[in-house]
Amino acid sequence: MPCISADGKPTATGIATLKSLKDGPLTPEEVAGKTGQPLFKVRSGLRELKSAGFVEEASEKFTLSKTGNDAIQ
């Protein structure tokens, strides 16, 4: 299931992924553990969310961008 809809907004899966990052940086494996999603879907979703500007990546961990934080408020 995609994390970004055709209108550029996060889907329910995308929102769940973003919410998993609200307490700080996580690896894809940690996101999968928090969301219950398969690792391959988490990795794909994080790539989508990063391309859309909702998350940032540093040292193999993902964090919310300002846009991502705004999306889950």
Image: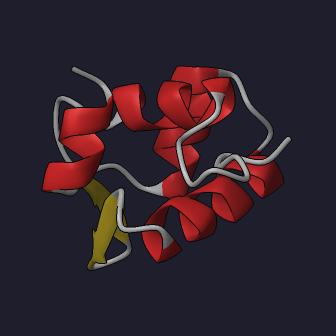
Where is residue 5 drawn, in percent x and y? 70, 46
Where is residue 14 drawn, in percent x and y? 58, 38
> Who's the residue at 56% across and 48% down the image?
29
Picture quarter containing residue 48?
bottom right
Badge count: 0
As drawn, 5 above or below 43: above
Name the foreground residue: 50 vs 43: 50
Left or right of 40 on screen, residue 35 = left
Picture quarter containing residue 58?
bottom left
Where is residue 25 drawn, in percent x and y? 23, 50
As drawn, 21 above or below 45: above
Query: What residue occupies the far front of the structure in this picture?
Result: 7
> Who's the residue at 55% across and 40% down the image?
10
Query: What residue occupies the far right of the structure in this picture?
Result: 1
Query: How is the protein colored in the picture?
Result: secondary structure
As drawn, 54 above or below 1: below
Quarter of the image for the N terminus: give it: top right
Left or right of 51 on screen, residue 45 = right
As drawn, 36 above or below 56: above
Where is residue 44 drawn, in percent x and y? 72, 63
> Who's the residue at 66% across and 30% down the image?
13
> Who's the residue at 39% across and 29% down the image?
20
Name the foreground residue: 12 vs 36: 12
Name the foreground residue: 3 vs 35: 3
Quarter of the image for the C terminus: give it: top left
